[in-house]
Amino acid sequence: MTRSGSPAELRRYDAATAQLDPPFAIVDMAAFRVNAAAMTARAGGKPIRLASKSVRCRYLIEEVLRMDGFRGILAYTLPEALWLADRGTSDDIVVAYPTVDRAALARLAGDADAAAAIAVMVDCAEHLDVIEKVAAGVANPHPVRVAIDIDAGYVALAGRLRAGARRSPVRTPADATALAREIISRPGLRLAGLMAYEAQIAGVGDNPPGRPVYARAVRLMQRRSAAELAQRRGAIVAAVRELTPLEFVNGGGTGSLAGTSAEAAVTELGAGSGLFHPTLFDAYTGFTGQPAAMFALPVVRRPGPGVVTALGGGYPASGPGVPSRVPQPYLPGGLRLDREEGAGEVQTPLLGAAADSLMIGARVWMRHAKAGELCERFSALHLVDGDEIVATVPTYRGEGQTFL
Ligand SMILES: Cc1ncc(COP(=O)(O)O)c(C=O)c1O
């Protein structure tokens, strides 16, 4: 069963946005602040580097960076990082995924401020070669700061079970020290830190609705993975620190803040989704959050009893093409998607008794399955505080920036 909001929330959102014509997106700032505070509490005193992909709105990123407990940005592309640094959003940015963007790397190596502010992710010598080759074409290049991405996935049953993101080939202390030595030996590079993101814990809900057997298997896997990773991450960090000092060791995500922050080897967390608290994050036993980002659709048709049709809504989230990636109706309560049509490209039928009270021109409120991807669909976010809109701010898209 999908989560529904309360009638009081519905009245508040409808009243605050009465003058707007849907579709549009809002952020409930009270919920956003509550979520931020809950995240920093779970981080147990360690700073959270804000995963910008999960916000994709410069105004909100800057708002979060002013809050206690958040420090620096975990960006998703180098052009994004350069743009954020250039706008003065942050001077402490780690790009979490490797880049082969030659123009962006040339800008990084050619700009003292950018080179000091930004670190890029690497996991093999080829990444280093790409950076060095670009820097060789730049007049007086500045050293490029890099971080090593460690594979935090869980492998069991002699490799027959694998959980986690397929990203870095660097898995052991020996792998990590070999790459660290390679970085240290290259004069144009500086090793700034390590990152090890345990997607199979931080990004996989252990309480998916209607799947109790799978949920038990997820919990078992997560317990074992956390124990294995704590030991391996600690050993990797210790081994690399013997070669060179590290500015940071980043780990975790919204779904693992409490567990990851307890590891002594981890100096900072990386997280963002918990701020908007999209539907995928309803499926965790360890914490709850308040839905903070929503989008409103207009009811444009009433095909028959128990069903209305809204305009738009087909904003599926990335990842495996499974039902949990589809947006869900949130308000009024008691609506559900049609199994055959789902959330449609131009029209979304919504079923349930509540449909009969929705006249043409009424609105329904939906939640996205993931956080920042919502901002690729809207050029602005209306920030609701109490029962009024206190600001309307551009998303990345609204600023003409679509990085991925
Ligand atoms: C490297 C890295 N760190 C942290 C996160 C956690 O982000 P969030 O808290 O938004 O789920 C992610 C998410 O994909 C990630 O790729």
Image: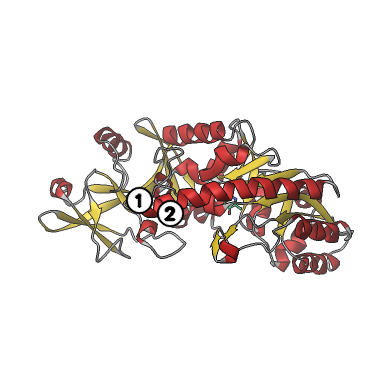
Q: Position of residue 314 (x, y in %)?
A: 34, 61
Judge whether residue 389 can be spotted in this image. yes
Q: Residue furthest front?
A: 157
Left or right side of 88 for 52: left
User: What residue sits right under mark 1 in the picture?
Assistant: 212
Picture disc at residue 378: 2
Give, as a three-letter code, the residue at label 2: Phe
Name which residue lies at 47% across and 48% down: 219
Give the camera-side residue of 55 and 337: 337
Give the camera-side residue of 136 and 273: 273
Name which residue lies at 47% across and 55% down: 373
Give the camera-side residue of 176 and 297: 176
Image quadrant where residue 130 sits: bottom right
Q: Position of residue 107 (x, y in %)?
A: 75, 60
Name which residue lies at 60% across and 31% down: 44
Q: Position of residue 163 (x, y in %)?
A: 54, 59
Q: Nearer the viewer, mark 2 or mark 1?
A: 1
Name which residue lies at 16% across and 56% down: 307
Give, as a three-letter code, the residue at label 1: Pro
Q: Quadrant of the C terminus?
A: bottom right
